[in-house]
Image (cartoon, grey):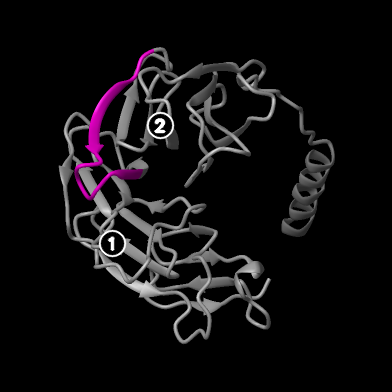
Amino acid sequence: MKKPFLFLCASLLGLSTSHAQWVSQPVAFSSTTYYPASLQAVDASAAWAVGSNPSGLFTPQGIGTQEVARTINGGSAWQTRTVPGLAADEVLTSLTAQSAAAAWVTTIGSTRSQLLRTTDGGTTWQPMLTLTSATADRSLNYVGFFDATHGLCLGDADNGDRLVLYLTADGGATWTANRSLPLLTDDEYLTSVSRPAVVGNNIWVSTTASRVFHSTDRGLTWSVSEVLSGATFTPNGPRALAFADAQHGLALFSRTDGFTDNAPLYQTSDGGATWQTAAF
């Protein structure tokens, strides 16, 4: 009976796939040139996104604006809002959604970088961490949570010493600086288009030097590996990182970064300690 059952499952799967459809759901930002980026769904009804501007300041989430979008009915309708209180040149660099009402964003401007939180669907935003240009650490580019209480916020350091890292153990009410990340090489920064990969208490972060920083304890301690060990060229770092579990992951590069005979997809089976080319 196993073969007929498997055949039936495959047939039903094919039938379901053949009838799947994509439905356009426009998001009305303040400019028709803006488009949604960093889309994050928290359940079947609620999702968030940030506005991206093709002619604006480049940020880790695309091209930054001051606008966020939210839906609470599965995308049938989207409400857009401008995050209040930002400086004229301050734009959003990342978004992390937690529920239909709660989300976090990071920002960067000429005089400060902020971590902001909303708990009322984006109507109001509270600064939870602010770094000014008087410090070397002023570029916050990512915020994420491992559970309801433990999270981290990452960014680039102007002095090139170490990446900016702040940790929270109380749901984001307070943040503590942590300097356990490895030292950076010359002109090394967070990879601009790749979000960190998170599995359980593990997090992997890629850099423009094609290195991957890995923590197994929610950001308290870190190790580092080179994805392209021995390569004769230096691309701009992985375009995407993804892990299926604590051991198996992929790093995707762009061929425009200098790849010719080399495959732009690399895989690891030891948590990122070593990487090998992957055929696809």
Q: Is residue 89 above or below residue 154?
A: above
**Disc 2 to disc 1, how far (Cα)?**
22 Å
Q: Amino acid at mark 2?
A: Glu
Q: Is residue 230 above or below residue 166?
A: below
- Image coordinates of residue 137 in percent, x first then y, are 24, 48
Which residue does the numbered mark 2 point to in the structure image? Answer: 90
Q: Secondary structure at mark 2?
A: loop
Magenta range is 124-140
Q: Is residue 146 left or right of residue 26?
A: left
Q: Amino acid at mark 1?
A: Gly
Q: Residue at x 56, y 38 (%)?
A: 56
Q: Residue at x 39, y 66 (%)?
A: 212
- Label 1 Cα neighbours within 10 Å, binned few <14 / some 14-19 / many ≥20: some
- Image coordinates of residue 227 in percent, x first then y, are 45, 74
Quick one: quadrant of the N terminus? bottom right
Instruction: Find residue 114 and report its image quarter.
Output: top left
Q: Residue at x 51, y 84 (%)?
A: 231
Q: Secondary structure at mark 1?
A: loop
Instruction: Find residue 211 and report its image quarter.
Output: bottom left
Give the number of the disc on residue 212. none
Which callout, 2 or 1, points at the residue further toward the start of the chain?
2
Q: Is residue 249 left or right of residue 169?
A: right
Q: Is residue 145 left or right of residue 17?
A: left
- Image coordinates of residue 138 in percent, x first then y, are 28, 44
Which residue does the numbered mark 1 point to in the structure image? Answer: 160
- Image coordinates of residue 125 in percent, x first then y, are 34, 19
**Is 223 colored magenta in this rendering?**
no
Instruction: Find residue 37 and report its image quarter.
Output: top right
Q: Residue at x 40, y 57 (%)?
A: 190
